[in-house]
Amino acid sequence: MKAYLGCDIGRTRPENQDSVRAESYPDGVLAIVCDGMGGMQNGSAASKIAVAAAEDFFRAAYDTDLDAEAICEILRECASDANRKVYQAAMRSEMRGRMGTTLVGAFARDDLLCLVNIGDSRAYLLPEDGQLRQLTTDHTVVQLLYEQGSITAEERATHARRNELLRAVGVSMRVLADIQSIPLAAGDRVLLCSDGLYNMVSPERLTGILRGTPPEQVPEVCIAEANAAGGRDNISVILLTN
C-alpha cells in the first residue's frame, strides 16, 4: 500500500489550517487529514495537534497482523486522544469552544481499509471497475437536514448552514467518532480530503482524475483543479493505492 499526499493554502485564505500525514508500517499505511477551525492560528494549531496526537497514539498501539476490529478500536482511541489534546490546548489558551478541527484517518492494507472520522473531511473509495463512493458521513447541519428530508441533496451545497459542524475534535471534553472497516481489492483507490477539494471539484471530475492520472500526480492535479475552480478554502488530499 502506497500513499501520495498534498496540501495547499488555496486562493483566498490567509493561512493554511489543514494538516496531513501519512506513515508507512510493515503491513499498511496510516493516513490522516485534519481541517482546522476557530480562526487562523487557532485552527492551524488544532489541526497540527490532532494529527500529531493521532499519529503518536497509533504508533504506540500498533502491532502487525491486527484484525479489523482491533485496528478500528485503535483509530477510535487515536481520535479520542486527539480530541483530548486539542481541548486541553484550547483551555490553556482560553479558546474554549473556538478551537477545533475535523479528522479523517485511515489505516489501509492491500485487502482492508479501516476508517475513523469526525466532522466533514471525507474518505472516498473508487473500485477498479466501480463508481466513486463516499465512505464517510459528514457531521454537519446540512447533512442532518438532508437525512431528515428537509432539503435535497443538491441544496446541501448552497444552504446557508452548510459550514456548520455538529461534531469536531477539541470543542468539548468528549466527541463521538464514526469507525468502519471495508474490504479492499486490487486496483482500488482510496481518497482522503478536506472540504476544500470536494466543494470545488465534482464527484464526476474526481473520478476522472483518479482513473486517468498516475497515482503520484493525483494530489497535484486535484489541488490544481480546486484552485482553478476558485480555491475558496485550504485543500488537502491523500491518495492510497495498492
Image (spheres, rainbow, N blue to C red):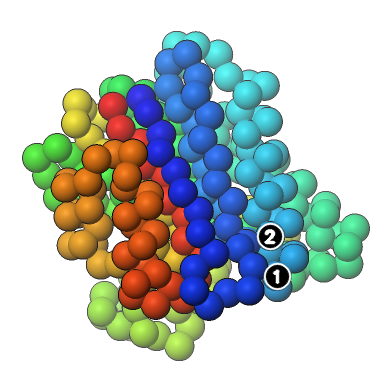
Disc 2 element = helix
> How far is the residue under mark 2 from the one under mark 1?
6 Å
What residue sits 55% from the left and 13% below the top? 63
Question: Residue 207, how many percent across, how many down?
Answer: 20, 54
Q: Is residue 221 left or right of residue 126?
A: right
Q: Is residue 71 visible?
A: no
Where does the image place residue 173, in percent across and percent down from the top left? 75, 54
x, y percent for residue 155 = 30, 83
Kindly identify the amino acid type of the residue bearing the numbered disc 1.
Met
At x 36% / y 42%, what residue is drawn?
A: 239
Q: Quadrant for the C terminus, please.
A: top left
- The residue tagged 1 is 40
Identify the amino acid type marked 2. Ser
153 shown above or below 130: below
Residue marked by disc 2: 44
| Left or right side of 119 for 200 | left
* Front residue (pair 17, 160): 17
Q: Is residue 227 left or right of residue 174?
A: left
